[in-house]
Image (cartoon, coloured by chain):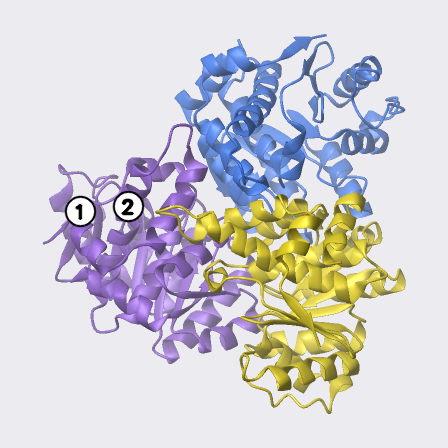
Chain colours: A blue, B purple, C yellow
Amino acid sequence: MLGKCIENVRETTPLVHNITNYVTVNDVANVLLACGGSPIMSDEPDDVVDITSICGGLNINIGTLNKSSIEGMFLAGKRANELNHMVLLDPVGAGASKLRTDTAVKLMDEIKFTVIRGNISEIKTLALGSGTTKGVDADVADAVTDETLDSAVKFVKDFAKKSGSIVAITGAIDLVADGDRCFVIRNGRPEMGKITGTGCQLSGMMTAFLVANPDNLLEAAAAAVCTMGLAGEIGWANMQEGDGNSTYRNRIIDAIFNMNGAILDKGAKYEVR
Amino acid sequence: MLGKCIENVRETTPLVHNITNYVTVNDVANVLLACGGSPIMSDEPDDVVDITSICGGLNINIGTLNKSSIEGMFLAGKRANELNHMVLLDPVGAGASKLRTDTAVKLMDEIKFTVIRGNISEIKTLALGSGTTKGVDADVADAVTDETLDSAVKFVKDFAKKSGSIVAITGAIDLVADGDRCFVIRNGRPEMGKITGTGCQLSGMMTAFLVANPDNLLEAAAAAVCTMGLAGEIGWANMQEGDGNSTYRNRIIDAIFNMNGAILDKGAKYEVR
Amino acid sequence: MLGKCIENVRETTPLVHNITNYVTVNDVANVLLACGGSPIMSDEPDDVVDITSICGGLNINIGTLNKSSIEGMFLAGKRANELNHMVLLDPVGAGASKLRTDTAVKLMDEIKFTVIRGNISEIKTLALGSGTTKGVDADVADAVTDETLDSAVKFVKDFAKKSGSIVAITGAIDLVADGDRCFVIRNGRPEMGKITGTGCQLSGMMTAFLVANPDNLLEAAAAAVCTMGLAGEIGWANMQEGDGNSTYRNRIIDAIFNMNGAILDKGAKYEVR
């Protein structure tokens, strides 16, 4: 089932507008191309409305935000909402600085996001901080493990219900939920944490999956998570003696380039709760 | 003949100032080093005049333009013109937003470019939009193919004549023309489109070729196009099972690193019309 | 002895705040992860104080400075000083433009740097230009070679004494000195100069080494230089036919990923003067 989601990306070449950080932007662009999408980057307030209008989806990543790009995020997000485009929020560093937390919370208040994707710490910050999501019990553990899984699944479903967005928490175990269902995903390798930006890459790719699968958004988001994790497994299996995190980065993107529906269906490891 | 152009780059190590987008900037720098040039990046208006003054060429790429970098483009371009430096325009996304189109057209009005390099869509936008180039018939097909080649050659020559710049249109078939002659180039691989920024890389490298070959500018521009396309062929021939677009990016830059005049002369596929 | 320094990085995972250029920032992040550190990037003035407060070290690189990031550098640097964090200055391009020279000199005047790391040209510019360092004889040769070594060692020690910072000059022979001792390091390969940003990568990594070795700062800085150079040697030894500078970049970062104390102690080539 999830395999069909990546096939739909390859058949429709969704155009994704990315307002993203300058650290990992090149990898985000190459991952979007690898999975069958097409990237455009623009953060200038005078440019973003035109650019997002010709795209199918918008990926907002606050990783190296600045005053100008923040303005661009709001303008692009509102325009994307008017056009009923897919819009994803990656709240990089929410909780680490007041500006990042405030920006992410304000984005959630003013823009409707199809998906919010982050690590457990970032998502907890948003759950606590957002006016629209008050009341969510964020007293959940700081890592999703088998021991904390039940409470984490409840938390992510609750936050999804209150926020009206699909919520994806990525880590050792990944959770992708709307208010009713939660995909619990066990693809991936711990060594992916030694590469900068696998989360940013996933957010870009996920936006393409959403655009290509408008009638199955939860499955699309879960398929993107499985694709990234499975690529991490395949890439790691291909590592040679002397290889390290730089080569691993290349091998993961390469594995996405070579991914198809059959590989994904065979390798995806998940249950739905 | 074209082989001599890359030899001249390696012998003179031209210093190229790049005002370019943050998506592909690292690859642009590494390609410039691979071909024998030396890159400097700077877009701050208070910095660009000094930086461009110590260089031999300026590469202006509007891919992730912002208000500040646009100001830097005009300041650097005018200074480079005063110093009779080589100046190249890569109008990334012209036609996709009003800001990009207006900026590219205004740059053409105020700065003399040695070369304008883009895809057919971007170049058509400039041909229609620029005050200095009014009258060029841009009613040419949206792709350069064997069927549309005659009209495309006429278009690129006309636009080169009117604009006073060498014009390079890259795609499945590449065209590099001044008002009189057009190099029709058939190097390259379609898979290069699955890597972000091969066009940006070419623009950076081409600027170095221009600086190193001031007496043969058209040949220099054509040699850069052939070098990029041939590197794409060599890189593809070196692909192993499991490799994808990320490794392909590395192999292309590697192939440029290993390119010399003999390899280029043997592998370049072009005719002059 | 130096081997212990990288072991300490791996054991403590120092968090490093980088205000660095957008050309090489991805490699800086991956090198920090490769050596066992953890990177955060932020240059927005409204964000940097919070971000630097949660880190152990700050790496300021002026490579693509702009008005906003310059403001961020001063704010972050002063906050890092208040917190007694490690702070490193990489004065990229000092001497190449007035803005870069003035910014680097002003940073030295207002912020106490644990280490200043640059090439001989940049360091000479700072030695001549800084009010706090007037009187240093910068009439030293423009390259550190066996012929110029004595005067270069004297220069770097003098500048370290006057500036109150450890000073690292990298080139064919690397010098890392405080006012009393100078590590003369002969690791590395000339081909490293064909990759963009090995200096930037070193600065990021060195900051992590400083944070992890607060009681042996000179050794920590020297260990980072040896690690980078040795990785360049190991990476070069792993090059295959057809490889070039792009693959070399990956192999160097990979070699750092696989570096440990024993490899470093065995491969480090230095004397102390």
Read off the residue under disc 1: B152
For numbered disc 2, what is the local secondary structure?
A: helix
**Viewer-proximal residue, B4 or A14?**
B4
Instruction: Give the image quarter of residue B218.
Output: bottom left
Which residue in the rendered view is the most extreme toward the left? B273
Residue B241 horizontal/vertical position (percent) = 38, 28
- Quadrant for residue A257, please give it: top left
Q: Is residue A196 visible?
A: yes
Q: Which residue was labeled with disc 2?
A: B120
Q: Secondary structure at mark 1?
A: helix
Label 1: few (<14), some or many (≥20) within 10 Å?
many
Residue B121 vs C137, above or below: the answer is above
Q: Residue at x 50, y 37 (%)?
A: A250
Image quadrant in which you'd find residue A154: top right
- Disc 2 packing (10 Å; few <14; some 14–19; many ≥20): many
Marker disc for residue A105: none
Cα–Cα span, label 1 and label 2: 9 Å
Question: Is A70 in front, or is A189?
Answer: A189
Tag 1 and tag 2 share a subunit? yes
B51 with respect to A101 (left or right): left
Q: Are marks 1 and 2 in contact (CB under 8 Å)?
A: yes
Q: Can residue C72 be seen from the camera position used here?
A: no
